[in-house]
Amino acid sequence: MIPDLFGIGLTGKTLTDLERRILRESTPYAVVLFGRNIENAEQFRDLIAEVKSLSAKPPLFMIDEEGGRVDRLRNLVPGLPSAEAFGEGERPRELSEWFGRLIGMALRWFDIEIDLAPVVDIPGGLSPKGLERRTFGRDAETVIDLAGAFVRGLQASGVAACLKHWPGIGIGSADPHYGATVIDVPLEELRARDLVPFERLGNEAAAIMIGHGIYPQVDPSESPATLSRKLTTDLLREGIGFDGVAISDDMEMHAVSDLGAYEEITERALVAGNDVILFCSHIERVPDLQTYLARRVLEDRRIADRYAEAVRRCDVYRAHCEQLRANAPVASSFDDVIDEAVRFVEEFERTRPHREIIVPDVDRRKNSRTPGKGRTGREEWT
């Protein structure tokens, strides 16, 4: 089997026999963790350890741990604030860095290498659905200041970062989990605002997640960024000089999964410029995708060259993760993580103005997650 570029999700809190076989025989580049994989701290740590024991070159582990509404560890480390909250009180940069250190400390204890955070999108008048309170500010300099502090804190604890969602979905028309989101602005406007945090922080983080937004004034084909070479190679590599790893957002989101068979969108994502391709809900499909990609590498010189470039970047990013881990201690117990979280949350709350916690009705989730309603029932997108 050729070196792998896929990131996959697991179905539950323990491995199935099928998952053990796939992880052993078709080891992916990465495993993406969700709330569905977590029961308690001991179980979660054991799950990760078992996966890593199954192959000579274990997958890297990734998780969306932002705090606020996208907080996979909410039942283990409760009370973590949203990114938007840091701009609402005193000492925002100091607390953002502490927040990164705390999350890094927790993930390092579980043996997770990568946090798929921070969000560096810049919202417009209203945040698109799915992005509420997940951003550090409403202008580029604030986002760079606070998200940059978060990245440095995270990496100081031995965990790698990943900026998202390239090239910016802050003024998108919809939530890409459920369908197409359009950012209908000229390239000059993107350059002046949305691209700035990625350009300033991208190589420091060493990873950028490619979103599924559609940018018709940049790519007239109206392909999502994950499938657009104009956006994911020309603009990302040549436009802002990013040399790190490009990680696709989940290819099972409807904004992109509705556009073709998994094999087709895998090939298009690779050719567009993604180095790691995520399929987070259906692990049983991954061996066939690996076989398909291996065959296409042999058949098409263009795909072979793009694949070799992606493998090189993935190897460099793995080495980056290993270096961060080598320079950071691991907490002696999970109690130490909780103690640090308590100290952080108490200080964070002390620096906030008094406020009523109200979730507006417009922001309350109403859509069903049951099968037959446009969702598989297994995804945990937020």
Image (cartoon, rainbow, N blue to C red):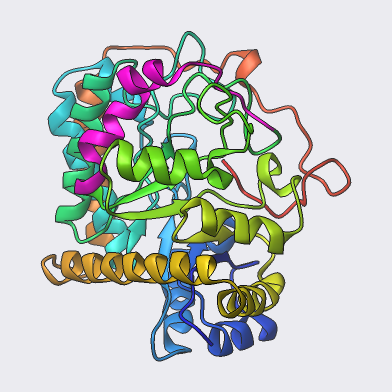
The extreme top residue here reads 125
Q: Residue at x 50, y 24 (%)?
A: 132
Closer to the camera, 58 or 99? 58
Residue at 62% x, 28% y is 181
Give the x, y percent position of residue 301: 52, 71
In this picture, residue 232 sits left or right of residue 183: left
Observer-nearest residue: 182 or 62? 182
Q: How many marks?
A: 0
Examine the residues drawn in magenta and state their main secondary structure: helix
Identify which residue, 118 or 189, lies in the foreground.
189
The x, y position of residue 10, in whole percent, is 60, 68
Instruction: Please say if 156 is above or below 294.
Output: above
- Residue 126 horizontal side relative to residue 268, left or right: left
Determine if residue 297 is in view: yes
| Direction from residue 53 to residue 366 in the image, left or right | right
- In the rendered image, residue 199 lying in the magenta stretch gets the answer yes
Quadrant in the rendering for residue 144: top left
The structure residue drawn at horizontal position 46% and vertical position 69%, both measured from the top left corner, is 307
Q: The magenta stretch spans which residues?
A: 180-204
Quarter of the image with the C terminus in it? top right
Which residue is most to the right? Answer: 372
Residue 333 in view of the camera: no
Name the residue: 57% across, 80% down. Answer: 298
Residue 159 percent coordinates (x, y): 26, 59
Most extreme residue toward the front is: 301
Q: Say whether residue 7 is magenta.
A: no
Residue 18, given in percent of the width and then of the height, sits at 69, 83
Q: Who is closer to the viewer here, 68 or 131?
A: 131
Work out which quarter of the rendered image holds the N terminus and state it. bottom right
Q: Is residue 251 above or below residue 307?
A: above
Image position of 142 (left or right of 21): left
